[in-house]
Each structure stands twice: as structure tokens, then as C-alpha cells.
Amino acid sequence: MAELLNTRQHQIVDLLHTEGEVKISELKHKFSVTEMTIRRDLEKLELAGLAKRTFGGAIPIGRDVALFERTGYMSEEKMLIGKRAVELVQPGESIFLDGGTTTHHVARYLKSELNITVVTNAINIGTELIGKNIPTIITGGTLLEATSSLVGPITAETLSGMAFDRIFLGATGVNHLHGFSNSNMYEAEIKKIAIKKASEVNIVMDHTKFGAKELFSFAPLSYVHRIVTDSMPDEVLRRSCIEAGVEIEVVEFPFGNE
């Protein structure tokens, strides 16, 4: 059923996972559609087993469904982005991966031969690295179940005492005016700290995030060295990235897919 959802409905699912609840009144303004359109969206998500409607909004069904849906959406694109991102990692580096399904694909393709050290604030990424013989540090912190991420003062203090050669972060949105943003303020704060402690900042994200602006901005374009993605953004965002010194690395699809 997940593949039958439109882009707006997938974005509502993402909001459910990060916020824990959505309100019809907020969604209709966010997406510039009618209340009836949002009600139909939520009805479809409930029929798909991805949400439970409440008075005035909806809540996610549960963590297992949330993780499955996030992993399945744009899965081929995220896999290719993850593979390309790993090609950037150099032997002996210390890298940081934050929580998210795209960064999870980065972890999936890391090899022990690189002799690297990985730091992450995401439980699912730490689990992915088990058995790979890659030294891994998982920060402490408060668990956000929807994203399997650790956040808060303990996470911040841990990262503040480290220095990374390269980091790979996910983002909920990026646009030419507000830079990179995230829908969860606690995750956004961790991203800000990681950026300060990194020699190179890479954002891994699929094209559906281009042009989106979430409430919590964590970096202007100029703070990021590279975006690894599956498609070139529109001309306005592309030019803004060039002016800010951001390299856009577009992965190649097998069989010439776009």
C-alpha cells in the first residue's frame, strides 16, 4: 500500500514519525490544501495501516510500522545514495552518522577494510554495524522511538568532545532561503553540534526534500560541503548551492533510470 501514496501523504507519514501526532488545521496550511483533502489523506493512511485518526488529526500506529514505512519509501534512491556516500569515506577516518533511513544505507555499505571509526546517535545504525568489525561509538541520550535517534544534553555533551573527518546527515527539507531544516527540534540541535565538530559536512537526501522548509533550520547552505542525492534540484536551489560552495553529487541509476 505504501507505494500507492502520493508525495504529500508520504510527507504526512514522515511528520507522524517525527512529531508523534499531526493536526488537520496545521496540515491544511502547511500543504495549502483544503481540510477535506487532508481528511481524505488521513483516511487513506488509516486504511493503509499507517495512522490512527483522532479528533482533529492522527497519530502513528506504532514504531514497527513507522520504521517499515520510512525504510520502504524511496528505497532504491536511498540505497544508491548510501553507496555513493561510502565512496567518499577515506581509510582511517572518524565519521559521524545521524539518524535516518538514508544514513542507515550509508552504514549498510561501510566496510571494515576502511579501518574507520563510526560515531552515531542512532540505535538502528549501531545495530546495522554489528558484526562488521567496524569500531562504533553510540552516544548516550534520550531515545526518540520514531527515528531510533538519541538526543538531548547527554548526546550533545558526548559529541562536543569529539572531532570528525566527515559527517553524513539526513534532512527533512532544504531550500535556497532557509538552508537545511528538520521537523524535530531535538534532532536539529544534534545536527548543529555535529556540523561544528566536522571537517567535511555531507547531507544525504532524496529529491523529495528539495524546496521543503521545516520549522527547525540546522544549517545554512554555506555550512555544507556536499549534497548526495538522486536528482538535481530546480534551477533556483541549484544556483544557490553553487553560490554557497555546495557540491551536488547526483547518483547514477542502473539502466538509465531517472
Image: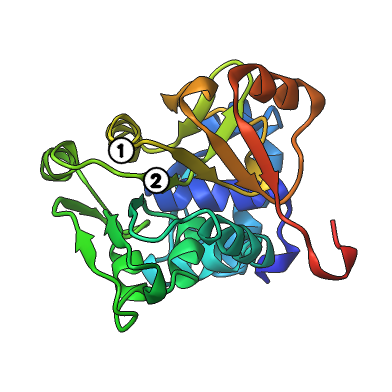
What residue appears at the point 74 percent right and 21 percent down from the top-left corner? 239
Task: Tell me the quadrant of the picture where the C terminus can be found.
Answer: bottom right
* Element assignment for label 1: helix
Determine which quarter of the picture holds residue 135.
bottom left
Q: Nearer the viewer, residue 197 or 5?
A: 197
What residue appears at the point 24 percent right and 41 percent down from the top-left corner? 163
Q: Nearer the viewer, residue 53 or 88?
A: 88
Instruction: Name the amino acid, label 2.
Output: Ile
**Residue 80: percent from left, percent from top:** 65, 63
Residue 50 can be seen, yes or no: no
- Residue 217 numbered mark, or none: none
Instruction: Name the amino acid, label 1.
Output: Ala
**Residue 251: percent from left, percent from top:** 71, 55
Would residue 91 be found to the left or right of residue 240 on screen?
Answer: left
- Residue 194 numbered mark, or none: 1
Mark 1, other Cα within 10 Å: few <14 / some 14–19 / many ≥20: many
Task: Tell me the quadrant of the picture where the N terminus can be found.
Answer: bottom right
Residue 237 can be seen, yes or no: yes
Q: CA distance from mark 1 to mark 2?
A: 7 Å
* Residue furthest to the bottom: 131
What residue appears at the point 15 percent right and 50 percent down from the top-left corner? 141
* Element assignment for label 2: strand
What residue appears at the point 64 percent right and 49 percent down from the top-left corner? 206
Q: In the rendered structure, are the residues bearing label 1 and label 2 in contact, judged by CB atoms less than 8 Å apart?
A: yes
**Residue 41: percent from left, percent from top:** 66, 50
Circle 2 residue: 167
Mark 2, other Cα within 10 Å: few <14 / some 14–19 / many ≥20: many
* Residue furthest to the right: 256
**Residue 62: percent from left, percent from top:** 38, 66
